[in-house]
Image: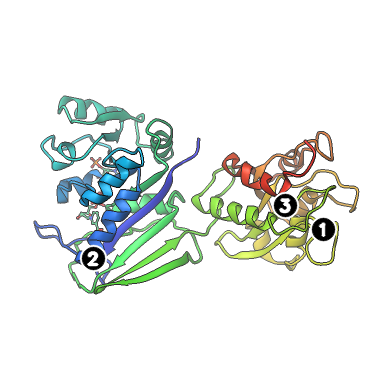
C-alpha cells in the first residue's frame, strides 16, 4: 500500500529548540512565516501531530485564510484538512481545541489507548493499530481509508524524529528563528537515533522577514525489501533518464541510477547512451563506477524497467552485471513485459543471487511513457 507524501514542518531556535519550558507556547516563526505555514496547511490533505503537542500547545491547526479555504472548497476538497493525532496512551483532554475546531479528526492509537479514548468520548474517529503504534500502518491507513496524498506533520520532536529516522519523511521544511532558548530541558527538534548516514539534499533556502526557511529531502535508499521515501525520488530520476534515450523500435528506453547507502549518487545511465547503440541503462551506469568501489556492496540500483535476464547483444544480462558488481538491492517501477524476450524474469535472477528487489508500481506509467511506441 503506498504512503502519502510526508512533509515534516517545524520552526527551531538557533540552539535547535522547538519550544522553551514556560507555560506559554514559544512563538518562533515571524508573521509572514505563519502565513506561509497556513498556505502549506491549505495544500495538505491532512495535518498530523503527536499527543505531546496537543498537551503542550492546545493547537487548533486550522487553515486561517478564508480565501484559501474557499479555494479548497472550489477544488472539491473539504474546507479544512483532516486533523490526525498519534497517541499510545489515548490519554488526551476531550476539551482540547483540536477536537472542536476544523473538519474531520482521527486518532491513531494502540488497542489499549483506543479503550481510554472511547471512555473519554474524544470527538474523532478512533483507529486502534494493535498493541503498539505502527507508522507504516498509520500512513497506509491515511492513504487508503482517508484518501490522504499529502500529509503535513507539525511535530513535535518525538514524531519528527521517528518519521525521519525510519525513512518515512519525503521532505523537511525547517524554519530557523533568531532566538536562543538556552534551557537544557527545552524540547529539541530531533532526538538521538539511527538516521541516514550522509547528507540530505538541500532543495530551497528562503529568507522570510527575520527567519530562514530551508527545505531538505532525505537521500538514503531503504534497506532490503523496505522502501524508504528517498527510493521514490531516485526511481523518479531513473524514469526521467528513460525519457532521454534515443528512440528505438527494437529495444526499451530505460533509465538507471546507482546510489550508495549514505545517499551519494555513484552513477547514472540510460539506454543507448553515448555512441553505444545497444547499451542498457544499468550497464551504462555500472560502467562508470570503479568495480573495486567498496560502496557497491551497500548500493541500490534504481532502474525504470526490471533489469534484463537474457540478452542477445552482450554476453551478460543486466541482472547478472548487477550481482557481479556486488550490488544486492534493486528498485524498479515496471516488470519486463514479453515484448522482446518472453518470460524474462530479471527479478528472479536477482533474488536467486541474494538481492532484494522492490517494485514501486506507482511509477509504472512513468516508466512506460517513453516506450509507448513499442508493440504490445
Ligand atoms: N516549533 C515547532 O515547530 C513545534 C511544532 C510542534 C510542537 N512543538 C513543541 O514540541 C513539544 C512537543 O513535542 P514532543 O516530542 O514532546 O511530543 P509529540 O511528538 O508532539 O508527541 C509525543 C507523543 O505522541 C505519541 N506518540 C508518538 N510516537 C508514538 C509511537 N510510536 N507510539 C505511540 N505513541 C506515540 C505519544 O503520545 P502518548 O504519550 O499519548 O502515548 C507521545 O508521548 C511541545 O513543546 C511543542 O510546543 C514545536
- What residue did someone put label 3 on? 254
Asked which quadrant contains residue 129, the reply is top left
Give the CA separation, mark 3 to mark 2.
44 Å
- What residue did someone put label 2 on? 32
Circle number at residue 174? none
Residue 300 shows in this picture:
no
Q: Could you tell which of marks 3 and 1 lies nearer the N-terminus?
A: 3
Label 1 secondary element: loop
Horizontal side of residue 186 vs 261, given as left or right: left
Asked which quadrant contains residue 14, the reply is bottom left
- Marks 3 and 1: CB-CB under 8 Å? no
Rendered location of residue 348, percent (x, y): 74, 38
Rendered location of residue 94, percent (x, y): 13, 34
Label 2 secondary element: helix
- What residue did someone put label 1 on? 279
Label 3 secondary element: loop
Query: Which residue occupies the foreground of this view, 347 or 185?
Result: 347
Nearest to viewer (mark 1 / mark 2): 2
Image point 70% across, 39% down: which residue? 335
Residue 226 shows in this picture:
yes
Rendered location of residue 37, percent (x, y): 28, 57
Nearest to viewer (mark 3 / mark 2): 2
Rendered location of residue 314, percent (x, y): 89, 53
Amino acid at each position: 500500500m503506498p504512503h502519502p507524501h510526508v512533509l515534516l514542518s517545524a520552526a527551531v531556535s538557533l540552539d535547535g529548540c522547538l519550544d522553551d519550558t514556560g507555560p506559554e507556547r514559544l512563538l518562533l516563526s515571524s508573521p509572514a512565516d505563519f502565513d506561509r505555514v497556513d498556505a502549506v496547511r491549505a495544500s495538505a490533505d491532512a495535518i498530523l501531530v503527536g499527543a505531546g503537542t496537543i498537551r503542550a500547545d492546545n493547537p487548533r491547526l486550522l487553515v486561517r485564510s478564508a480565501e484559501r479555504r474557499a479555494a479548497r472548497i472550489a477544488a472539491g476538497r473539504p474546507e479544512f484538512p483532516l486533523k490526525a493525532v498519534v497517541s499510545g496512551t489515548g490519554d488526551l483532554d476531550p476539551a482540547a481545541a483540536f477536537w472542536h475546531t476544523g473538519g474531520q479528526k482521527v486518532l491513531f492509537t494502540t488497542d489499549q489507548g483506543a479503550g481510554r479514548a472511547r471512555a473519554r468520548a474524544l470527538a474523532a474517529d478512533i483507529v486502534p493499530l494493535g498493541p503498539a503504534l505502527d507508522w507504516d500502518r498509520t500512513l497506509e491507513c491515511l492513504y487508503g481509508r482517508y484518501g490522504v496524498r499529502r500529509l503535513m506533520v507539525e511535530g513535535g520532536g518525538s514524531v519528527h524524529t521517528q518519521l525521519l529516522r525510519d525513512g518515512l519523511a519525503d521532505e523537511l521544511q525547517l524554519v530557523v528563528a533568531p532566538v536562543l532558548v538556552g534551557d537544557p530541558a527545552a524540547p529539541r527538534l530531533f532526538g538521538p537515533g539511527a538516521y541516514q548516514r550522509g547528507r540530505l539534499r538541500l532543495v530551497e533556502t528562503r529568507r522570510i522577514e527575520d527567519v530562514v526557511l530551508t527545505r531538505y529531502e532525505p537521500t538514503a535508499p531503504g534497506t532490503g525489501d523496505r522502501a524508504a521515501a528517498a527510493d521514490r525520488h531516485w526511481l523518479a530520476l531513473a524514469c526521467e533518464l528513460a525519457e532521454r534515450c534515443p528512440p528505438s523500435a527494437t529495444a526499451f528506453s530505460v533509465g538507471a541510477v546507482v546510489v550508495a547507502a549514505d545517499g551519494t549518487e555513484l552513477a547514472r545511465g540510460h539506454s543507448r547512451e553515448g555512441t553505444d547503440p545497444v547499451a542498457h541503462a544499468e550497464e551504462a551506469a555500472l560502467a562508470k563506477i570503479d568495480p573495486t568501489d567498496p560502496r557497491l556492496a551497500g548500493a541500490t540500483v534504481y532502474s525504470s524497467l526490471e533489469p534484463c535476464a537474457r540478452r542477445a547483444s552482450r554476453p551478460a544480462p543486466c541482472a547478472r552485471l548487477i550481482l557481479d558488481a556486488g550490488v544486492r538491492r534493486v528498485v524498479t517501477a515496471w516488470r519486463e513485459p514479453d515484448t522482446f524476450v518472453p518470460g524474462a524474469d530479471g527479478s528472479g535472477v536477482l533474488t536467486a543471487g541474494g538481492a532484494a528487489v522492490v517494485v514501486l508500481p506507482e511509477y509504472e506509467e512513468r516508466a512506460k511513457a517513453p516506450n509507448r511506441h513499442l508493440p504490445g
